[in-house]
Image (cartoon, helix red, strand yellow):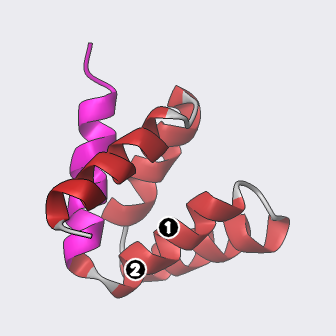
Amino acid sequence: MDLSEIDQRLRELVATIPPEVRAAMLEVPTADEQRRAKEIGGLHSLGLVPAMAELMIDAEEDPALRAVLVGVVRESGRP
């Protein structure tokens, strides 16, 4: 899978997430490390949107993915 395919799949995934949840998604990756860990752990332990929790965990481990995710979520909120 090349980068353009990853980008497209990420955009498709983000498009399926309700806008209010996307807003929360934007806050988590841009927060400080301690808050990110707490928020991601909360999502995971509650079983809320498991795929989203896994994506946030992956983004935590990969700063480049985190940056792309933030960009995609920001763009998804534009008219």
Pick out the residue farthest to the right: 46
Task: Point out the frontmost of discs 1 and 2.
Answer: 1
Local SS, label 1 = helix
Crowding near pointer 2: few (<14 within 10 Å), some, many (20+)?
some
Expressed as whole percent of the image width and height from the top left, the position of residue 16 reads: 54, 35
Residue 44 sits above or below residue 5 on the image:
below
Expressed as whole percent of the image width and height from the top left, the position of residue 50 reads: 70, 63
Q: Residue at x 22, y 59 (%)?
A: 68
Q: Identify the image quadrant of residue 1.
A: bottom left
Say left or right for 56 vs 42.
Answer: left
Is-magenta flag for residue 5? no
Q: Residue at x 34, y 43 (%)?
A: 11
Q: CA distance from mark 1 to mark 2?
A: 9 Å
Q: Amino acid at mark 2?
A: Glu
Pick out the residue farthest to the top: 79
Screen quadrant of the C terminus: top left
Q: Which segment did they paint magenta?
A: 64-79
Q: Which residue is mark 2?
A: 60
Is-magenta flag for residue 72? yes
Say left or right for 79 vs 20.
Answer: left
Q: Residue at x 48, y 40 (%)?
A: 22
Q: Which residue is mark 1?
A: 55
